[in-house]
Amino acid sequence: MMTNVKEQERDELHKAIWNIANDLRGSVDGWDFKQYVLGIMFYRYISENITNYINADERAAGNDGFDYAELSDEQAEEARADMVKTKGFFILPSRLFCNVRKSAKNNDNLNETLEKVFKAIEGSAQGTDSEDDFKGLFDDIDVNSNKLGATVTKRNEKLVKLLDGIGDMKLGNYQDNTIDAFGDAYEFLMGMYASNAGKSGGEYYTPQEVSELLTRLTIVGKTEVNKVYDPACGSGSLLLKFAKVLGKDKVRQGFFGQEINLTTYNLCRINMFLHDIDFDKFNIANEDTLISPQHWDDEPFEAIVSNPPYSIKWAGDSNPLLINDTRFAPAGILAPKSYADLAFIMHSLSWLATNGTAAIVCFPGIFYRGGAEQKIRKYLIDNNFIDCIIQLPSNLFFGTSISTCIMVLKKSKTTNDVLFIDASAECVKVTNNNKLTDANIENILKIFTERKDVDYTAKVVDNSVIGTENDYNLSVSTYVQKQDTREKIDIYELNKQIDEIVAREDVLRSEIKKIIEEI
């Protein structure tokens, strides 16, 4: 029953987002629209979050009819210091979402009002522990952009529609845990635009089912981890899967990630708040992970998950400092300048805890190409860091039909071998894409956990065989035989049948000849 209620709420939410999209269609491009919707949703969320927090406190103290939204700004100022310390931010009552929305239709300066509100929210964290989590958070929601309209009046009309559309969304009562509605809305938007935006969407979005599989691979046998990390975290969906699968309190020291794209970095921080991760429980950085990693003081990590960009260029050996970098030096060679894939692998391995597991989505080329990549594979195999390679189905990711793989890394293995799993058939077809079902995920995890040979599906291969017999090739197809589904034919039996047919044909010919002669 509860599931039905949840699904009904989710459907209503998705319809509301579609309606806003239709209202703004043509004026705001998909990806930009997503930023506006998420930004205003975030504004509503933190407004209600702080209001509910203060109201609950006051009502618990016996002040039954108290409502923070109705206080004067002067009265509210008294709570500022305490709120910044507890929540990481502060909003005056006049600047709360509900109050700005109330007067929006009659506010000729709505765009200026919103700009001031956003600056004030960011400013409230300035000089405090939460500053890094709030700084520049609203930068992508440009309320003065021509994308919203050519004139201030037209822009404000769109902003009123956004405020009303988001204000009317049924986001439930926080106490009922339907706060997930924010996360669901976020994921719906990401999926909606990733599927429409082709490759550019794929850069930002890892399908939820793949996130689920990666997360669960890293926590086999565990009910909690110290902290999780993603070196190319995008909008944070992989990190946040841990909050869903384990529970956010079971990630004891929090969520860490780095993202090079400024817009996506902002979305990631917003996403953390939307999923109710407190400011002191996440640390997301905006820099190039390979050249300028920002979490030296936080590593090692017990769980690392990532879907790094495939085959991007990087500095490689043109930067003389990198070969001595403690992340890359152990392999004795750097990933090629044209393919940074194995640089992400080496970085992740370096920051992985001794009792940890990393699960990383990989482009298949890195498993069989020669040169520097082969030498890095040799280092990984000879030092027994690779636990498992999983071949995924094709067409899982938006914007690419490639059959990607997952590499699972561990530093404290008990056996000197690698498990190869061919999971290319573990999917169902949905429109043009393939999708992992719950049953597919469970089946892959079962094979991963049992670590046994399974005909045509899984093979445990000794490291020495990978090295000496296969030149450190890590392609699943090298070790897991494909089932031959062709019909088997007994050539002797077939020849016997042909001889019988020829003999019968000769008899028929002679009989036909006799009949013709008699005629």
Image (cartoon, helix red, strand yellow):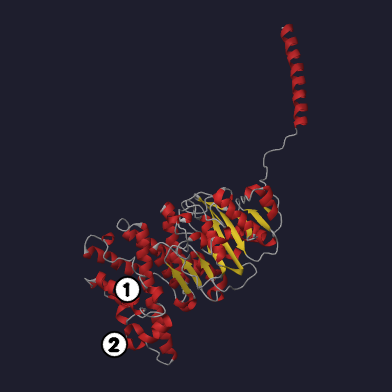
Give 198 or 463, whichever is nearer the viewer. Answer: 463
Hey, which quadrant is residue 287 in on the image? bottom left
Left or right, 123 with reference to 1: left
Check whether the beta carbons of the residues at disc 1 and disc 2 lie within 8 A of each other.
Answer: no
Picture layout, residue 48 above or below residue 211:
below
Picture layout, residue 145 above or below residue 502:
below
Residue wearing tag 2? 74
Q: Secondary structure at mark 1?
A: helix
| Mark in front: 1 vs 2 | 1
Residue 350 in the image: state x and y as whole percent.
Answer: 56, 65
Q: Amino acid at mark 1?
A: Phe
Give 463 or 12, whichever is nearer the viewer. Answer: 463
Residue 37 in the image: state x and y as whole percent.
Answer: 36, 65
Q: Secondary structure at mark 2?
A: helix
Residue wearing tag 1? 118
The residue at 74%/19% (across/down) is 505
Residue 515 in the image: state x and y as whole percent.
Answer: 73, 10
Picture layout, residue 351 above or below residue 333:
below
Left or right, 71 with reference to 482: left
The disc placed on residue 71 is none
Q: Report if residue 275 is visible in the image.
A: no
Picture layout, residue 372 above or below residue 15:
above
Residue 353 in the image: state x and y as whole percent.
Answer: 59, 69
Q: Report if residue 416 is visible in the image.
A: yes
Q: Amino acid at mark 2?
A: Glu
Q: Residue furthest bottom?
A: 62
For the residues labelled 1 and 2, the Cα–Cα distance comes to: 19 Å
Hey, which quadrant is residue 99 in on the image? bottom left
Left or right, 348 with reference to 164: right
Q: The N terminus appears in which quarter of the rendering?
A: bottom right
